Image (spheres, grey):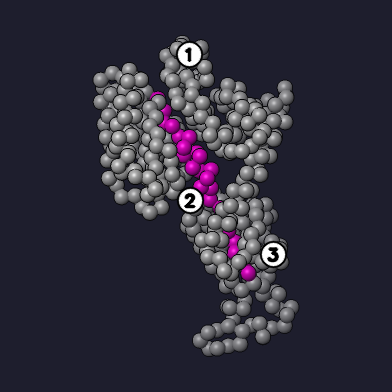
Amino acid sequence: MIGKDKIKSLAGLRSPAGTFLTVTLSTSRLDDWRQTVPTFLNSEFSRVVKERDLDKKQERDLQEDVQRILDVQNYEVDQHTEGIAVFADGAGGVFEQVALPMRLLNRLVVEPTPYVRPLIHALSLLEPFVVVRVSRDESSVYLIDEWRVTREDDLTGPYLKSSDRETGDVPVKEYFAAARQETLVDLHFKEVAVVLDKLLDETDARRVVLCGQHDIVANFRRALSARAAARVTAEIPWDAAQSLNQMLVSAREAVEAARHDEMLKLAGRIREGLSALGHGVAGFDATLAALRRGQLQTLLVERGYRPPGWRCLVCDHTVLTPIEECPVCGGRTLRVEDAVGEAVRTAVINGTFVEVAEQLPDLDSFGRIGGVLRFV
Ligand SMILES: [Zn+2]
């Protein structure tokens, strides 16, 4: 499981020796990971030792951390796990492992702080959401978290409820006048809406997908609270021939499409706000500076934007052009593989919303990273 609080506490850690180790690995059965991971980790370790000019103690500590991660490959990973992220700083007493239901690139990063960006990307893909499959007879409310149903509430409508199988009572359908039936259906919809509200109270789910025949869904919408109604992002048809899993895949696609629309609007807002007194900021340097000032409400980064950079070992100042000495504090710098990782980490610590997106023409046009300012 992966939570925002966990990522935030990780992001705030710092290795006293400046050698915090982050490793991400694919553990998908498609990759022969138990065979390839040891070679990968050992060769990456040698590379880092050579590049970083570590002293003997640093090298030994780092080697112990790598060894501990090598042991991870002997673990049994459960069938849903396709990727593992490990955060280790033995000298600082840290060893955290996060299992994810998605493949991760094999990567080894040694920086003063944890490289949390892959977790933020995972969070955006694994966003929890709710699906309400609604009919007049029987409805279900599903919570989907990390791509799996983690909670299901089934509610029986008036028809099934009153057709007592044991006594063979006449179903309500033949029993009540049409008007009375409608009232009972409305009551059923209200019950479902109450369950939905409760779920929204208890979880982080921000989006709801409704599934059913369009006219029935339209009636059900009237039973929703204003808050639940505002969270409905999509409606998908109910196909009785579909399995639950197929329905959930359609729901996930609908959530992703809704999210992409939102990101298009966010990038548009940033672009429009790039004037002198606007609320937009764009490009690596300006965005990182705004983050450092605590001025950024939302950070938007392109999923594949990973420019190398130079980061100050003392004050974390990071730039995209090679420098040996930090222009802010005069400290020594370190070449990092992904400078945007430092922007994402700063955002997480500050409580700035981080959005990850791709295929946004506006975002491309202003440098693949930008944000919305809280104040100008
Ligand atoms: Zn500095």
Q: Nearer the viewer, residue 21 or 221?
A: 21
The span from disc 1 to disc 2 (Cα, nearest Å) is 41 Å
Q: Earlier in the sequence, mark 1 or mark 2?
A: 2
Q: Which residue is mark 1?
A: 323
Q: Position of residue 103 (x, y in %)?
A: 43, 44
Secondary structure at numbered mark 3: helix
Q: Is residue 264 left or right of residue 121?
A: right
Mark 1, residues whose alpha carbon is within 10 Å: few (<14), some, or many (≥20)?
some
Picture layout, residue 230 above or below residue 215: above
Disc 1: residue Cβ within 8 A of ligand 1's nearest atom: no
Q: Which residue is mark 3?
A: 214
Mark 3, residues whose alpha carbon is within 10 Å: few (<14), some, or many (≥20)?
some
Amino acid type of the residue that numbered disc 1 sits on in the rendered structure = Ile
What is the quadrant of residue 216 in the picture?
A: bottom right
Mark toward the viewer: 1 or 2? 1
Picture layout, residue 119 above or below residue 217: above
Secondary structure at numbered mark 2: loop
Give, as a single range, the part of the protein colored magenta.
112-135
Magenta run includes residue 38 = no
Q: Which residue is mark 2?
A: 146
Q: Earlier in the sequence, mark 2 or mark 3?
A: 2
